Amino acid sequence: MNPYILSTLLFGLGLGTTITFASSHWLLAWMGLEMNTLAIIPLMAQHHHPRAVEATTKYFLTQATAAAMLLFASTTNAWLTGQWDIQQMTHPLPSTVLILALSLKIGLAPVHSWLPEVLQGFDLTTGLILSTWQKLAPFALLLQIQPAGATLLVILGLASTLIGGWGGLNQTQLRKILAYSSIAHLGWMVLVLQFSPTLALLALLTYIIMTSSTFLTFKLNKSTNINSLAISWAKTPALTCLIPLILLSLGGLPPLTGFMPKWLILQELTKQELPCTATLAALTALLSLYFYLRLSYAMTLTMAPNNLIGITPWRTCHTQLTLPLAFFTMLTLLLLPLAPSALALLSP
């Protein structure tokens, strides 16, 4: 792609998200979301592969449906209450429709089925943008309207953690596994959104860090399915030793970074006298942990069933910048000691 066109699209992507962040009027927020969608569509379809074009079409139809629902709900709210302000969502009907529209935009269960199929059609760089940056604007709107649909958010959160863990169990494609991982992590964030918005933001930040390091690792190894992980030791031996730790951090095991948000979320749910919800969320985390362990096993404890020539690929010089990978990997593994600082920030 022409670098000028690429720069324009990335600028549009950033501008759309910034407009949504800064807006207090529903029409401005909707306009920012639409700019965001229109800017990423050429990035998705740039390879002209039939699967990429199909995934782009599915993504466009899903986002257009969610945007129409959002516009309908905000108009209905203005009709019922006379307010276009994002903070003034007082009527239950438009609030419910808006939460479902934003859930469709970010891929929360039960309106999640588009996300694994769409992510499977893209390359890993576009998948990284879709899994991280594209979640920010809808999540910012959810943060502002969260008191309106408390019960609905808990139901969506529990359904997402369950389906995100369950759906990834029998997958062999890495992008689909990361899509279900995204659904599960978003479920954890939505679960605690109404009780502690700051904690939900902390969970979003750690999710972005861990997902970025995972996508960049797979991009460096050019891995797209579980079988291709078995030859990664021949390409990048040092990184292969670190990848299981990155995956276990995604699963939420101590003493890694991913343990911090889950620990604090379970603690917050228990404080809010929701022990059953906390127990269910902790049990669904075990489902996600299983497929992260499966990836770790495939990468470090198995060898590809090929001859010697097949398992020692040429060590050609790659052109990928490895500084972002090193930065995100370090954050993914070593941020847990900052948990007391996070607690101090979260305390009122």
Image: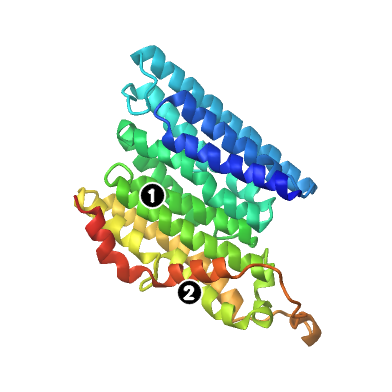
For residue 223, the mark is: none
Provide residue 204's location: percent of width, then percent of height.
42, 52
For residue 189, the mark is: 1
274, above or below 246, in the image: above
Answer left or right for 247 relative to 9. Answer: left
- State the separation of the CA atoms marked 2 and 1: 22 Å
120, above or below 72, in the image: below
Looking at the image, the residue that sits furthest to the front is: 4
Give me the residue at 54% from left, 45% from top: 134
Depth order, front residue of 57/170? 57
- The answer to which of marks 2 and 1 sits earlier in the sequence is 1
300, above or below 51, in the image: below
Answer left or right for 304 relative to 49. Answer: left
Q: Quadrant of residue 152?
A: top left
Provide residue 263's location: percent of width, then percent of height.
31, 62
Q: Amino acid at mark 1?
A: Met
Depth order, front residue of 192/141? 141
Depth order, front residue of 317/296? 317
Q: How is the image coloured?
A: rainbow
98, above or below 128, in the image: above
Q: Amino acid at mark 2?
A: Leu
For residue 245, the mark is: 2
Give me the residue at 52% from left, 74% from top: 244
Q: Element at badge 2?
A: helix
